[in-house]
Image (cartoon, grey):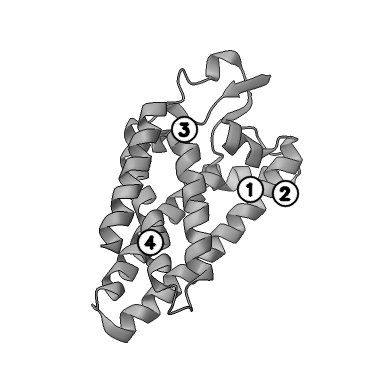
Amino acid sequence: MQKILVWDWPVRLGHWLMVGGFCLAWLTSESESLRLLHVISGGTVLAVCAFRLPWGFIGSRYARFVDFVRGPSSVKAYLLSLLRLEPSHHVGHNPAGGWAIVLLLGLGIVTGLAGWAIYNDFGGHPLEELHEGLAATMLTVVVIHLAGVASGSLLHGENLVRAMITGRKNGQPGEAIASARPLAAILLLVWVAAAGWWIAS
């Protein structure tokens, strides 16, 4: 086992843009004076999620949904291996983490669309309540995801946060991706910037 390139630039960049966007949106959610910042932050999350969906089909090996979305039996087996303190190693996302990602993407899109509708005076109070409930649900999934990252890092002896920065995890040389896809990362940045400009205008 050695450090190999696993996460491409769009996955890493999109991950941290979502982290920053969600945190900023949550912190500004109750401020009327920072409403535009709240909307742009939420729009960033929405834009990243919208980009991540097609990237889950055309991205590099470990970015693809087919690599990490597994059935209930695989998730159960992985969680049981965690309880035994002997989790099975996955070069990409583990089965439980894979479903956390799917949930976060879905919640990011639905929450963002609800927020955009509210910002444009659609839906009224019921939609505001839905938006807040979705955001709270997303925060719950984030907390569970963080717990999984912490436990996985400790039990595997591998810093998963650092891996999402460097793109490198433990694996065999033949399991590495060929390219970090930097051009796609530039496209992601342009897309997010355009979405933010459109929302703010």
Mark 3 highlights which residue? 9
Observer-nearest of 195 and 162: 195
Report crowding for label 3: few under 14, some 14 to 19, many 20 or more residues within 10 A (C-alpha): many
Q: Is residue 198 visible from the viewing direction of this image?
A: yes
Mark 2 highlights which residue? 83
Q: Please say if 77 is above or below 157.
A: below
Residue 172 horizontal/vertical position (percent)? 61, 17
Observer-nearest of 84 and 113: 113
Report crowding for label 4: few under 14, some 14 to 19, many 20 or more residues within 10 A (C-alpha): many
Whether residues under marks 3 and 1 lie with C-beta atoms below 8 angstroms apart, the answer is no
Separation (CA) of disc 2 from disc 4:
40 Å
* Label 2 vs 3, first from the N-terminus: 3
Check the image and name the residue furthest to the top.
174
User: At 31% across and 44% down in the image, what residue appears?
Assistant: 191
Separation (CA) of disc 3 from disc 1:
29 Å
Residue 41 horizontal/vertical position (percent)? 42, 60
Q: Is residue 52 left or right of residue 153?
A: left
Q: Secondary structure at mark 2?
A: helix
* Label 3 vs 1, first from the N-terminus: 3
